[in-house]
Image: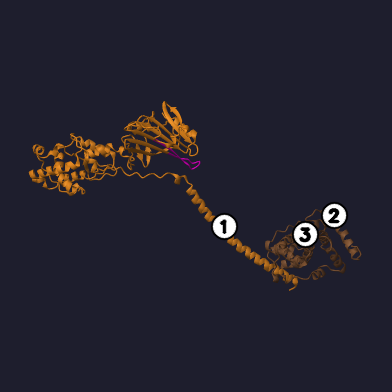
Amino acid sequence: MDRFERRAQAIMERGDRIIADRQKKNTMIRRISFSVSGLCAAALIVIGIWKSPALHRVPEIPQLPETMTTEATETTEPATEQATAPAEEKTTKPKKTEAAAEAATAIPTTAAPAPETVTAAASAAPVRTEAPQAVQTQAAVTEAPAAATEAQTAAEIPVSTAEPEQPTEPEQQPTEPVQQPEEGEELATSPPLQCPTQAVEVATLPATAPETPVTAPATQLATEAAATWEKGTSTPEYTGRPEPDEYGIIRVNGNIILPTSEEDPIGIKTVCSKMGYLDIAPSYIMPGFELTRLITEEQSGSRQLVFGYRRIRNDNNKTNYLWLVYKVSEEADIPENSGFSALADPSEVQVTEINGRKFRYRYDNDSQKLVAEHLDGRYAMYVQIDGLTQHGAERILMSVS
Amino acid sequence: MDNGASSYLRFLDGDNDAFVELVREYSDGLTLFINTIVGDIHISEEAADDAFMKLYVDRPKYKPEYSFKTWLYTIGRNTALNYLKKLKRHRFSPAEDLSYISDETDIEAEYIKGEDRIIISRCIKALKNEYAQVLFLVYFEGLTVAEAAKVMGKSPRQTTQLLYCAKKALKDEMERRGIDGQI
């Protein structure tokens, strides 16, 4: 091996080492690049999901099914002389007990508890129904009370006071004819019969109504029906077929549909008019806004109705809100600046007249928020618009009519 | 093909013996040429090895429009310049890789045949690097002016001018040494 061969051999050995190192490095780089690219892809997916507009939607507040609970304190109102007036529970129970005792003495056959007795007990216990339709049905039934029912109710009150929490299903009880006391005797011996508590049968509901009929005092149910909107609870969400409530509002799977007409294409004025608020509303709400909140609130001496609109913008993933609040004070006129503290500073508040109504409003450029109020004696209307430009927010406000 | 092109093509096809042939044929000339750039025969040998290493590892494509010698010397020149930059930072070479490094005199004696040429070669070393390069390429490696210009990265006109000046400088050097300036 001459020196040239040794020299070439040395060069080739060094070259082989370099080639092996390069291959090792390439393998390492390939593995790392696959791993890093996988991590980057995962990160991009996570960021994409995180930035998705679907995540920025305000979660719906779960609306509990409407419950009508008869509380003991709600029945303590004084009884009236009307036949359908609610009787005080505290005073009625001992009277009914006496009447029952008298009835049991006069009529031994009523000693055994009858199915109707149990239903009366159920009526004394908290009764839950699920729909305003049921309330209307109950009210209708209440108008035609049967004399026999009255007698049964009066005679069977002791059972209901003994075990009010355990309503017994009618089919499990032996059905025995109840001997009714004569009218003359009842009137003479049982004072509560002069103001009997009427038991009515609640109609079964189409979707979730139990097969067992539940009876409740008609007066209590009527009170609940009238106070459905006054309790500050949101309107229940129906899971069955959509039917408008007494104000024409339809709620289907979280969507709120207002009754619209040619004169009121949005429907706010119709609802406000039916519920006794100022019947003014913006006639223009830009496309994309959806009604997601309809809340009634009742405070001491006032009540208010809140419409909440929301719009999710695709261009910047921001959400715009439009709140319309209608307030009625039962006592005195509503003072200025009662709605927004931002309107307290007169130097920053603009006063304008929109379709003959005076509005005070202010737009804050930093927060992109417009607040406005309109006062009309005991009535007030408040507007809050979030996330829109001043031009867009004022366009909605100026369309109030 | 001549001038080692065929050997290089065989090496590209996987024949390592062809690479040994290239080393045998061009290593001394390339070393001496690089020596005119770096001025140190040992560093020149390392740089020449690096030039061959480029051929072995990177296997660059050879363009037949140039002669293989011109192409290889161009690679050698670029390698020498990079080597000089690298040497400014640090110098490291495994001891076992230096076992083949020969003495400058041996290489010169083997590669440059004839006493007169050896004397001229020693006079060339005293000249400027550019003069030494162009004289070595033209008179010892037998390249044309155009090929020498290609290797040195200059135009033929510049190379011709450079060659003229180099010959004049070589004559003066030889006269200074008491040698007849006839070259």
Looking at the image, the residue that sits furthest to the left is A106
Instruction: Say if the magenta span includes residue A317.
Output: yes
Q: Does residue B167 sit above or below A195 in this rendering? A: below
Chain letter behind tag 2: B
Q: Which residue is mark 3?
A: B70
> Decide: marks 1, 2 in contact (CB < 8 A)?
no
| Residue A201 makes an appearance in the image | no
For image coordinates 76% across by 57% down, the residue present is B66
What is the crowding at mark 2: few (fewer than 14 residues within 10 Å), some, or many (at least 20)? few
Q: Quadrant of residue A308?
A: top left
Chain coloured brown in the rendered structure: B
| Residue A227 makes an appearance in the image | yes
The residue lying toward the viewer, choosing from A235 and A256, is A235
Stretch of the chain drawn in magenta: A310-324
Q: Which mark is residue B161?
A: 2
Q: Quadrant of residue B107?
A: bottom right
Q: Which mark is residue A222?
A: none
Q: Secondary structure at mark 1?
A: helix
Image coordinates for residue A360, horizontal then vertical, percent? 43, 31
Q: Which residue is mark 1?
A: A33
What is the crowding at mark 3: few (fewer than 14 residues within 10 Å), some, or many (at least 20)? many
Image coordinates for residue A116, horizontal then vertical, percent? 16, 44
Chain coloured orange in the rendered structure: A
